[in-house]
Amino acid sequence: MEEPANILVIDDERGIREGCKRALTPEGFNVEVAETAASGLRQLGEGSFDLVLLDLMMPGMSGMEALDRIHEIDPDLVVIIITGYATVEAAVKTIKKGAYDFISKPFTSDDLLLVVNKGLEHRRLTLETKRLQAIEEEAKELSRAKTELEKLDAMKSRLMLTVAHELRAPIAAIQGYLGLILDGYAAEDQQEMIANACDRCDELLDMLHDLLLLAHMKEKAGELKRKKTVSVATTLEEVAGLMKAEAQTKGLNFEVRIQDRPEILADEEHLKQLWTNLISNGIRYTPSGGDVVVTLEERDGQVVGSVSDTGIGIAPDDLPRIFDEFFRTRQAKEMEEHGTGLGLPIVKEIVERYGGTIDVDSTLGEGTTFRFSIPLSVEGAGGALEGGRVVGEAEAV
Ligand code: ADP
């Protein structure tokens, strides 16, 4: 059953207050009264009303002034102005200001009931319209979320197809080698075939390693587990120390320029992975005699790192796909047969995990620069570093 409507009568004339109450209460309305606009407003603020009968001419705050205040309390509250004959003009003005209707004194209880019922019906319709609009808005929001989920689902399926396709190639090759050996077709080349099969196994394991890493990165659970204050410069020094020999063997000029030593709240392994992938790409895709230069600095509250090389570069058409899973350029495949095409997606995932961005600048045949920025203080990552101090989450190892 519908709740009875709550009505407030604000009038300084006792006769009107009592008369309204007497006329409306038997009709099942809850009626309260107020002698002044100020006390009426207080009652409106404290209770929940559907309709107000408001006298225009009152000592103290006028009905006109009260009207604005009433609509600040509840814009959908129905206000019916009670007016003497002389103030009809003013009553019309109040309608322009948002009052629903007016009733002129003197009035009968039938007149009153008519205007009150009309007003309450108007309120019911207004609230119903608003409710429907809210439902419509919610439905739109749900439909947007559904489209987003469908897109993600499609992306996931596409990725699974690509993964299956990429894993199939080395397995099919291994199966081919083994078949030839088994059928006795490889008597002379047996050693070579086994070595080839082993190479393809290595390739497969590399791919699985990177896939697992990427899957871990994408998995948000456990995100905070290994976070601690990490010096980005120290992780770079450690990684560079390990890669230096490879660069030297290849005859590259390898330089690391550390300008600042920023610290962030991070999983150390993530930072090492970030540097390792970018630097190893620089080394692998730069012919001997070339340069690989790594820089690190702190700028405008960001950790800014870059890896530049004078290597094979990336064609403009390939640049937009460079962070896609398994994507490798023709030039890269020609130079380095093996590669998973998963290093850069891992790098991107790491940078974005810490609220940062990465971009690439490259000219085919001349060289490439990858540059990333990670905010020193990451909001919403369960804690952040500000001025070297941990804020939020307690330091966790
Ligand atoms: P991988 O190096 O194993 O192929 P990545 O995801 O690390 O996989 O890189 C994807 C592709 O991006 C590479 O195959 C190569 O085509 C291109 N690339 C990445 N880094 C460089 C670079 N420094 N110079 C030229 N090409 C690069």
Image (tube, rainbow, N blue to C red):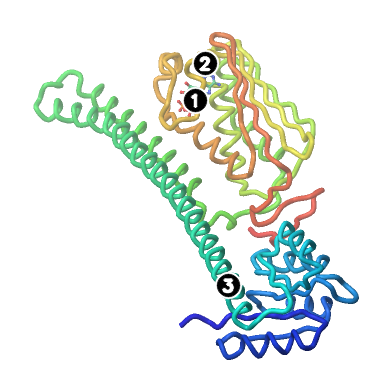
Residue at disc 2, secondary structure: loop
Q: In this view, does 38 lie to the left or right of 148?
A: right
Amino acid bearing label 2: Ile
Give residue 72's mark: none
Q: Mark 2 points at which residue?
A: 314
Q: Distance between the residues labelled 2 and 1?
A: 9 Å
- The answer to whether the residue bearing label 1 lies less than 8 angstroms from the nearest atom of ligand 1 is yes
Residue at disc 3, secondary structure: helix
- The answer to whether the residue bearing label 2 lies less than 8 angstroms from the nearest atom of ligand 1 is yes
The part of the image, by quadrant, that contains residue 31 is: bottom right
Q: Distance between the residues labelled 1 and 3?
A: 64 Å
- State the residue at coordinates (29%, 26%): 195
- State the residue at coordinates (48%, 15%): 317
Residue at disc 1, secondary structure: loop
The part of the image, by quadrant, that contains residue 335 is: top left
Q: Mark 1 points at which residue?
A: 322
Q: For marks 1 and 3, give the one nearer the viewer.
A: 3
Above/below status of 36 relative to 361: below
Q: Where is residue 330 in the image (x, y as percent from the top left)?
A: 41, 15
- Check if mark 2's residue and mark 1's residue have beta carbons within 8 Å: yes
Q: Name the residue under label 3.
A: 120
**In this view of the protein, which residue sits in the foreground, 353 or 12?**
12
Q: Position of residue 243 (x, y in %)?
A: 59, 29
- State the residue at coordinates (53%, 82%): 3
- State the residue at coordinates (59%, 21%): 247
Q: How crowded is mark 3: few (under 14 residues within 10 Å), some or many (20 or more)?
A: some
Q: In this view, does 77 lie to the left or right of 201?
A: right
